[in-house]
Image (cartoon, rainbow, N blue to C red):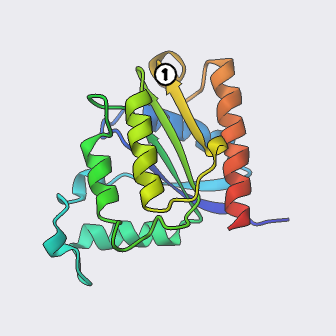
Amino acid sequence: MTSKKNVLAISGSTRKSSSNLNLIKAIETIATDIFSITLFDSLLEIPPFNPDEDTDAPPAAITRFRKQLKEADGILICTPEYAMGIPGTLKNAIDWTVSSMEFSNKPVALITASSVGQKGHTALLETLKIIEARMLDSTQLLIPFIKTKVSADCKITDESTLQEVQKLVASFSLLMNEA
């Protein structure tokens, strides 16, 4: 039997009670026997990307973020779309990994859960592809109208969405086991 993998989960929303955070917690329950989730909850501590500071000794928050990414067997990103794009804090954090390559060949699952989400999802997929994140079509999911599908007590209430998330979890687990 394969040991449980460690997943670093990143919510693209900085709201304390966001639907994306609730979705991560729901996935944690669904995947409890498959992988363990550590929540990265420090997006607001990441300084604005500055190439002059992207050195062998970057800001401490960047060093911690990069270390967590390196130590994870896989990365789960659950994010809303904001103004038809990627939330700025999430994009900023990812920008800090371009030269250090923590995402390169790292198994990634991406869920964009928003009111609509298509444009933000597409933009983030392009970013993840360029930094060589390891993804499959089956480890990507767009969930429109998320507020009607995940409850405040972190349960997926829409049966179709639950099935799609379960399939994503299974595919993501297989992807991590291949790494």
Q: Residues within 10 Å of mark 1 (few under 14, many from 20)?
A: some
Where is residue 153? Give x, y as percent: 52, 27
Identify the residue shown where x is 46% and y is 45%.
125
Looking at the rendered structure, the secondary structure element under dot 1 is strand
Identify the residue shown where x is 38% and y is 35%.
120
Where is residue 108? Give x, y as percent: 55, 54
Q: Is residue 4 shown left or right of residue 152?
A: right
Q: What residue sits right under mark 1 in the picture?
A: 144
140 relative to 51, above or below: above
Q: Viewer-proximal residue, 103 or 63? A: 103
Q: Which residue occupies the extreme right position in the image?
A: 1
Identify the residue shown where x is 46% and y is 30%.
113
**Res 133 seen here:** yes
Where is residue 176? Give x, y as percent: 67, 61
Where is residue 127? Give x, y as percent: 39, 51
Q: Quadrant of the C terminus?
A: bottom right
Q: Is residue 106 shown left or right of residue 176?
A: left
Q: Which residue occupies the extreme top position in the image?
A: 148
Q: Is residue 76 shown left or right of residue 14?
A: right
Q: Quadrant of the N terminus?
A: bottom right
Q: Viewer-proximal residue, 168 or 44? A: 168
Identify the residue shown where x is 42% and y is 27%.
117
**Res 79 seen here:** no
Q: Is residue 3 shown left or right of residue 115?
A: right
126 relative to 134, above or below: above
- Amino acid type at circle 1 is Pro
Q: How many marks?
A: 1
